[in-house]
Amino acid sequence: MSEGMEEFREKICGCEISIKRKGKGKKVLFLHGGRGAPVWLPFMEELSNKFELYVPEHPGYGQSDTPEWLDKMEDVGYFYLELIEHFKMQNIHLVGASIGGWIAAEMCIRNTNNIKSLVLAAPAGLSLQRQYGLDPFLSTDDEFTRKAFYDQTLAEGMINQEVDEATMDLILKNKTTGARLSWKPRLFSPQLEKWLFRINIPTLIISGSHDNICPLDQSKLFNEKIEGSQLAIIENCGHLPHVEKTDEYCELITNFIME
Amino acid sequence: MQVMCFHLMPYASIDLTKVGDNECLWLDYSNSNYDPKEGSKLYKRYLDEIVHGAQSGFHAIGVNEHHQTAFGLMPTPGVLAGALTQRDIGNVKLGVIGRGLPLLENPLAIAEEYAIIDNLTEGRLIAGFVRGIGVEYHTSGVNPAESLDRFHEAHDLVLQAWTQPGPTQFHGKYYSHRYVNIWPRPYQEPHPDIWIPSQGSTETIMWAAHPSRKYTYYQTLALAKVIDKYLGMYKSVAKDYGYEASPNQLGWSVPVYVSDTTENAINEARPHIEAFINKFLKMPVERLLPAGYTSIASLKGLINARKSTTLGKYQTIEALMENQMFVCGSPDQVIKFFKKRIPELGIGHLSATMHFGTLGHDQTMRSIELMGKQVIPHIEGL
């Protein structure tokens, strides 16, 4: 737990979610990936030193409720557009990781009125002709972790961590919601690609050079479809640049937002 | 007591020496290992075996559905059931136990397929409805998180198609049909017998036992204590609904092998039943129980149960017989077992899986004959 980080619950669209917040300055809304955001990680601390960072847990994930209306990733996108209005946020900088990137893209093809800039890190959501990333629904937790990291010592460290029952419950909850939202089509929306041209705000796409979950080619496709977007490739890095290359990742985001 | 001769139609020609210890014969075990010349022989052989059951004293014969696996070669069981209707099967009932309703985008296809079989048999179809085991949500691509709702909705659609004069309309969350008006209609009025096979699920039992349905709950392969638990649950749920469950509402499926002596039966069956359980059925949890397939609490319970029970480690024939996951012996031995077990369970339907794993044709035929002619006459009155 970080000093000064506050954690609170908020009811939006009939769904109570859990939100972590810390820092001062420009508002940054971070949307987590498929494994949720149960704990305050070093990259969050780093970003909160420069910005007012919001880290909500998506509907259906972690400590947040699972609402009846939750069917598709675009539902989560609409939810966060409502959250921005709910908090009367303006000039938000949106950062999405993996499926969080997909959610951020679903938001921005619809409405960027209160969104100042967009970062998609190792984003999911687009179809490549052949899906050659790992199938997260068919792999074990350990297989997924090994594939997610370039540096296997980090993967082994994570695998060797003890998992208590409460954590196991959260993992199962996150997986269940993940299946609900992205089983079919597997981790993409066929509608997303054709509307990406509508994204009219500065956009940075970050990808690890060795992402085996959402391959670099997918980030390249986002880059190609979002006019004026930049692509930053972090070398010797897998699917979780915020964990594997925290400094480089935070520097890229900080420089981009400060521009 | 009605006894069914049930067949899974596995790819028995498989070379198990080439299957690694950690390999799974479901989903991604390459179909380059399937030889159509062998497969076409197997289909003919298996149909002969089922027909032999019909001619040897069984009251019913049965097939089922699985996809993309050497475990069973019946992705569209209606084709095999259709073939059986044109064989000399007398007046036995013909069960398709069952078809996976949620796996289809248009479940009316199942309403139609079943209606044809019911017409071809002049009303002797037993219509099985299943959700499909977890791996079928990988093979079909359908979202397991939608499985239960889709099952209920598809069931309502099929029943509407069978019982309400068409054209009607059906509008649900997953299925929407402006025109419901199937030809043919089923032969049986108001509709064919419905069985609900299940691995064991409280939700399924609550639903099947409901007074508006009273469907036959058919417990698939499981440990004796699991069978007791779920069949007992059906009876107590029925009581809570205010009625007594009849034996006709309860079924149990178990592999059976009969030979001249119990010693011979065990020796003959050993490699094949052990291959069936340890190779053909082996499946990692991500396939058997994908995320979303059950509630989180049930998923956790099933994962823990699986870890703590026998299904995790190699199963010998002795352990399987001990756990009543396999019934094996001389006719007298098998009669003795069922005479005790059937009244205990209070079931009116026994489905005997008369072929398993790599069991050969001659042994299968003889076991079917002994079961039909020497065992069934002594247990059908139970």
Image (tube, coloured by chain):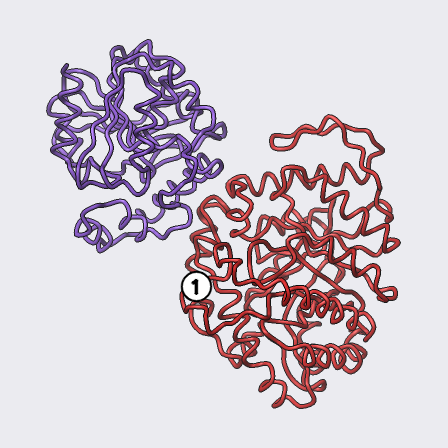
For residue B366, above or below residue A203? below
Q: Mark 1 lies on which chain?
A: B
- Residue B72, horizontal then vertical, whole percent: 61, 61
Q: In which quarter of the image is the C terminus of chain B?
A: bottom right
Q: Quadrant of the N terminus of chain B?
A: bottom right
Crowdedness near tag 1: few (<14), some (14–19) or many (≥20) residues, C-alpha within 10 Å: some
Mark 1 lies on a secondary structure that is loop
**Horizontal side, residue B242 vs residue B267: left or right:** right
State which quadrant residue B352 falls in.
bottom right
Q: Name the residue under label 1.
A: B23
- Residue A81, horizontal then vertical, whole percent: 37, 17
- Residue B138, horizontal then vertical, whole percent: 50, 48
For residue B149, above or below residue A141? above
The one of B46 and A27 positioned closer to us in this rendering: B46
Q: Look at the image and give the colour of chain A.
A: purple
Q: Which residue is drawn at 43% across and 67% down?
A: B312
